[in-house]
Image: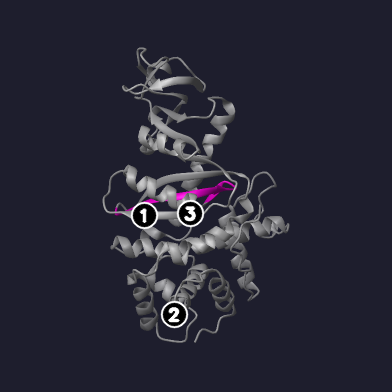
Amino acid sequence: MPTSPLYDSIHHQMTEQLVDAVASQLATLALIVVAVSQGVAAQLGRIARSMPVATTQAAKEQRLRRFLDNDRITQETHYHPIVRRALQGLKGQRVQLLIDRVLIKNHHNILVVSVGFRRRSIPLTWIALDHRGQSGLEDQQTVLRDALALLPPGVRVSIHGDSEFRSQALFAWIRGLGHHALLGVTGRTLVADTCEGTATSLESRMAGQTGVVYLNRVYVTEDGHGPVNVLAWWDKDPDGKVLVRAVMTNLPANERTYRLGKRRMWIETVFRDWQSGGFHLDKSGIDDRQRFARLLLPLVIVYLWYVAVGRWVVKRGYRSLVDDGPAQCWKYSLFQLGVAWKERMASFTQAIPVLLYLYL
């Protein structure tokens, strides 16, 4: 039997929130969540070693494998109730949903929707794609529909995506649901000032420009979709190549919308925390895509937990105890603050609080 007070705390909260989960599944999930929270790792051997249960390493690894093989462990039953409750404080607010895709170790292709929060984002739902290329419209609509269902009532939603999500069908679908869309387009996108006007590429329109160009009520691509608003600017890709980046939106093309669009990058920090900045998912050693997607479930619960603890540390005025950065220039993100607070508490043989909700 588990003997960890931290296990007792997390198991109690999960029992209250995951009311449709089988008791044995809850017990194993709580063990894995505690293990991931202590080791901040995605390697099965390390997770098993940190599971607070009095049995052999081989038995713990076998229990972990059975969990990952169990197709009755689902986001809908074992995660969505937790994140739905965690987001209740967003009721009536403006909410940024971020859709993106991450390829982990050139093998696992994961489509994710997150909700923006304090320069980070909290994953809401995800799909392990069965191919390495871009996602399709049906998968995009599925994850967005599931994510929207988790938000509290009365929120005003903006949906952000990079140029992979530039299809007119997705844009029209988002607008049909009554939400704002900020979807990336490439510099090769053709834009015309009128429905039947001559279309030129954004790269051509950006020639000689140094700042952001704001185009209101224009028509994009050969089929004259619009009117929409477009923001375009020069940037560099990771290899240093100069290129045009742009966003297609129904919001006014102005500086305020440009600043809002920058929040799309908040999902990139999650992918970094999943890998080199935190759990090292790229070293999990799991090849099967469904088992890998199921491993994400306890990791995402821990991610939510540590972001919540990081925010709690800030609100309580404790940040300087683990982060010596000045008030306007922290060294650590909220997730990293949560990890640092866990390590500080461990030095006093104390556990961090189990927080599965977001302080605003």
> Looking at the image, can residue 52 be seen?
yes
Q: Quadrant of residue 24?
A: bottom left
Q: Horizontal and vertical percent for residue 328?
A: 68, 44
Residue that lies at the very extreme toward the right in this rendered image: 317
Q: The disc labelled 2 sits on which kind of residue?
A: Ser
Q: Nearer the viewer, residue 316 or 323?
A: 316
Residue at 42% across, 65% down: 42
User: Magenta stretch: dominant SS?
Assistant: strand
Q: Quadrant of residue 348?
A: bottom right
Helix, strand or loop at label 2? It is: helix
The residue carrying mark 1 is 127
Q: The disc labelled 3 sits on which kind of residue?
A: Pro
Helix, strand or loop at label 3? It is: strand
Q: Horizontal and vertical percent for residue 30?
A: 49, 74
Residue at 60% across, 46% down: 154
Q: The disc labelled 1 sits on which kind of residue?
A: Ile
The residue carrying mark 2 is 24
Q: Horizontal and vertical percent for residue 69?
A: 32, 71
User: Magenta segment range?
Assistant: 107-121
Q: Magenta stretch: residue 112 in it?
A: yes
- Label 2 and label 3: CA atoms lie apart by 25 Å
Q: Horizontal and vertical percent for residue 299?
A: 46, 63
Q: Magenta stretch: residue 208 in it?
A: no
The residue carrying mark 3 is 123
Tell me: residue 225, above or below residue 288: above
Residue at 34% across, 75% down: 66
